[in-house]
Every structure is written in structure tokens, then in C-alpha cells.
Image (cartoon, helix red, strand yellow):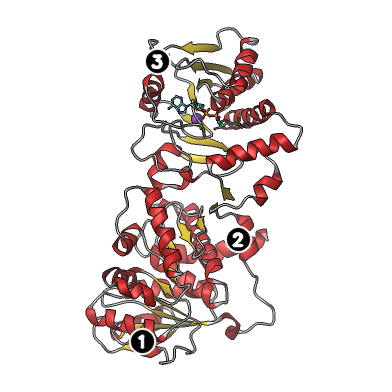
Amino acid sequence: MKIFTADQVRAADAYTIEHTPITSLRLMEKAATQCTQWLIGRYGAGHSFHIFCGAGNNGGDGLATTRLLQQHGFEAKAYLLHYTDKFSADNRANQAALRGGEAASLIMLQPEDAFPELPTNAIIVDALFGTGISRPLEGLVAQTVQHINALQDQYPIIAIDLPSGLKADESSKDLLTVEARHTLSFEVYKLAFVLPENAARVGEVHILPIGLHRDYLTQTPTRYQVVDMEMIHRIYKPRLPFSHKGTYGHALLIAGSYGKIGAAVLSAQACLHAGVGLLTVYVPECGYNIIQSTVPPAMCLVDDGGQQSVQFHEAVTADGQGKYKTVAIGPGLGTSGDTAKAFEKLLQRYHDPMVIDADALNILGAERYLLEQVPKHSLLTPHPKEFERMFGPSGNDVERLEKLSAAAQQYSLYILLKGRYTAIATPEGQVYFNNTGNAGMATGGSGDVLTGLLAGILAQGYSPEHTMILGVWLHGLAGDLGAAAMSQEALTASGIVRFIGPAYLEIAGAK
Ligand SMILES: NC(=O)C1=CN([C@@H]2O[C@H](COP(=O)(O)OP(=O)(O)OC[C@H]3O[C@@H](n4cnc5c(N)ncnc54)[C@H](O)[C@@H]3O)[C@@H](O)[C@H]2O)[C@@H](O)CC1
Ligand SMILES: [K+]
């Protein structure tokens, strides 16, 4: 699903109005109808709806929603904030329509008025500002938003289109905004929804269709997209009946050190569950028995360098054209000087896309010049701390996203940034946001599982871009299925591995 900027949303509205018989007032009615249905479906009988409206079209959505809720027999009141006399045309039309209905359901709130008393069954709806926000909230609006936010433990707060005050395409880090439990937005995602700094403001996001013109939606190029099942279906390739293990590639996984062989085990198991044809795991000697007994399908190479591996570069031939379709390196590897040297030699020998994670990223962070030597189109999988070690700190999430995208373009790499919506930046400047996964996956070893999954998918012949999108999606979905079966709390990295299979089934079943 595409992420539109506020300008693109406005253009989509205008295009729809120009190319179909629909008017802007009618489009507002559709938006309000969708919001009404969602509110009724979610909260139903026994609730009263209190809708705080601004003077623009977001306020218009709120006024129309108030009227439609009443028509469905619900108690609903609109509070129209009187901070200006410049109401939009569609806002005025909906004020008139509401005045024509139930008495006392449209209340003008003046700057000197106290915040209204709300009954215990209240649902607060925020329709103050949407995409039209252009400056920080102040005066009556700021006071109202502060009041609303202070009530968030008492009443559900539902934002229409955007929590008021939030900018759709920029950071709102230090701005006052509504803190909603749910945000009901229309047709497409907005960048603000996927930024970690907005988590407490947007709550759960629900995208409701309002009939914007298909041509505009499909033909408008966007820099950002949210990965959805449709995209996954385009990427996923079922196995061929006449294939053999050679068809699905041979991956080399370089991981583990004394006390961290578990990282190698988890990665290796995930790589096998991803569907790799053959797997060789390269570990220091202390890992030999462990790998052979816990991951029997994998072959094992040992390094006699002591507690960390220090000569893994020798596992690939000097011309780099060895038997391995891909190499994944990093989980539990250690960052000693000799390990770092071996990593540098590996980069000189191996020229196909690799998967680089954890300690291998930390080595890159310490020896930045090595970034230039990473094979083009390799996959880097940092969490925010590792990312910061490599590319420096950022003032806010949008700045960090720009940094991520710039690095991916500069070094021709696919770099992801882990989070609730893991961002995947491509060398072409695109950024995909993943929408699977849950807080249960914030557990040791979860990243090692992702590394193995990516290596296993890449080795099967998927392109690096498709590997990133499919791998991150599968990882999150396995976590979601695991959490559904055993709770987020009890989910472990091994649990995620166990649910890679069911996650594949879900994709294959829906195809
Ligand atoms: N036909 C359309 O364009 C549709 C628009 N829709 C709704 O319309 C919204 C956009 O409406 P508008 O463009 O009227 O914008 P808003 O309703 O978000 O804002 C209204 C106006 O407030 C002013 N403003 C900005 N920041 C302010 C501040 N801090 N304090 C006081 N005033 C401020 C601006 O002049 C702005 O145009 C969307 O978010 C969506 O909710 C929906 O009804 C769907 C259809
Ligand atoms: K709003």
C-alpha cells in the first residue's frame, strides 16, 4: 500500500472530483460514512460520541459523522471550536445539515468556555485538523487538545484522518498533538503513521476506503510504501515440482563465538526453515558439537582460532566464485581485531550480495572505510543502535529515515532499520515499511532468526530487494502466529523459528 504525502492526498481528492461525478461534499460524506460505520462497529450501543471539530474539512468530516451517528440512533454531539470565522465551504454545509437535525447537538466552543463535562460512556472523536495543519497549535485549540489528552485513560480517543497537530510528512517530535488510541484515515497510509516517535499519538491505524480514483492511486509514484499481502504474493514463488536441493542454493553462515553459539544455532535453523537447499555453518571449535547436534541438516566448518572465528575468509575461494550462493555473517560473531581482519579479507574475496548483521555491523561501524568494500546489493540489518554506530545519531525519525535512504543509495545496499514498522531502504531511494510483527519479538535472538531467514531466501534465488521484503514480512508473521499461539510474553526466538512454516502456509494458502 502506498504512502501518500499530504499534497498527494489533496491531489487524489481533486483528481477524483474532476474525473468522476462525485463532489467534494459527497467525498466528505463518504469519509464520514466510513468513520461512522467504524465507530458503531467498534463501540456500538451504550456509548455517546463527543466530536471536537475544527473549521476546515477535517472538522467537516466530524460534523457529518455527528449527523450520521444521530441518524443511526446514537447520542452524538459536535463541539465546533470558534478560533476563527473562516470555515471551509463543506464545513459550513455540514454545520447547516447538523443544525437542521437534533437540537443542541452542535455546540460552539468559545475561547473563554470551560472544557465540556463528558459522561462516563463518552467516546472522544478528534476532528480538529487533518492534512491542512500548517503551524503549531495555540490558544483554544491547544487548550482543547491538552484537555483531550489528559482524558486518554478515561475515554477512548479516536482521531479522524490524523491526530490533530500531527504533520503527515514531517517530524512532529516536539509538537503538541492529540494522542489517539485509534486513527481512522482514508485510502492510503501517511508517513507519520509509521514513525516510531508517533507511536503514542496515532495508536492503531485503520485505513478506510472512500472511493478515490483508482487511476490516481495506482499511477502516482511514491517514495514510501507499506508492504501488504498483494506485494508478498507478487514476490513469493512456490517451489517447482521437478526441483532438487541444488535449485535452492547453498548458504554459508558465519556466526557464533564462545558463549554465543546459540546465535549461530538460531540463524541456522531459520535459514533451513526459509527453504535453503544446503547450509554450511562456520563456527569456532567450541561450536562444533552444538551445531552438529542441534542443527543436523547443516554441515559444519570449524575455525581453530580460539573463542572467536578468525579465518573464515578461507572458506570462500580466493577468486570469490566459490560454491556459496550467499554468505551471511554476524550473529554472535564477536568483534576482536583478528575477526575484523578476517571480515575485511572476506569482503575482498566474496563479491555477491551478502547478509550482514550484528557484530559484523559493529565492525563496519568501527571501520567505516569497509562499507565501500561491501558487495553491492548486500543486505544490512541493523537495529537503531547499530545503525547509529554506523551512520551517526539523528535528531528525529524523519532525519534518520533520510540518513537510511541516503546510505542505501550511496553504498548501493539494501539497509533495513528494525522497529514496529521495519523500514527497508533500497539503492534506488525507495523505502518499504513492514507491517507484521509484535512486541513479543523484542527478545534475544530474534534478529539472529531474521539473518538466517534472509540468507535462506536469498540463496534460493530471490533478488536482494524481494529477499528483504519477503524475509522481514515472514519474520514478523511468524512472530504474530507464535504470539497468537503462546502469548507475546512467552514468545522466544526459537518460537519464531517454529512458526516460519505456518507463516509460509499463510502466504501460499492465500495465493
Ligand atoms: N475533498 C477533500 O479534500 C476531502 C478532505 N477530507 C478531510 O479534509 C481534511 C483536510 O482539510 P483541510 O485542507 O480543510 O484542512 P484541515 O481541516 O486539516 O485544516 C483546516 C485549516 O486550518 C488552518 N490551520 C492550519 N494549522 C492551524 C493551526 N495550528 N491553528 C489554526 N488553524 C490552522 C489552515 O488554514 C487549514 O487549511 C483531511 O485531513 C480530511 O479529514 C475528507 O473529507 C475526504 C475528502
Ligand atoms: K483529526
- Give me the C-alpha separation between circle 1 and circle 3: 68 Å
Which tag, 1 or 2, sits closer to the chain's start?
2
The amino acid pointed to by label 2 is Ile
Q: Which amino acid type is shown beneath numbered disc 3? A: Phe
Q: Secondary structure at mark 2?
A: helix
Q: Which quadrant would the C terminus be assigned to in this image? A: bottom right
441 to the left or right of 47: left
Residue at 46 percent of width and 29 percent of height: 157
The single residue placed furthest to the right in the displayed view is: 21
Q: Residue at x 66, y 18 (%)?
A: 71
Q: Position of residue 312 (x, y in %)?
A: 34, 86
* Residue picked out by circle 3: 115
Of 199 and 214, the residue lying toward us: 214
Q: Position of residue 283 (x, y in %)?
A: 34, 82
Label 2 belongs to which residue? 232
The relative height of residue 471 versus residue 41 in the rendered view (above or below) is: below
Q: Which residue type carries mark 1?
A: His
| Left or right of 145, for residue 60 | right
| Circle 2 Cα neighbour tier, 10 Å, few/some/many (<14 / 14–19 / ≥20) | some
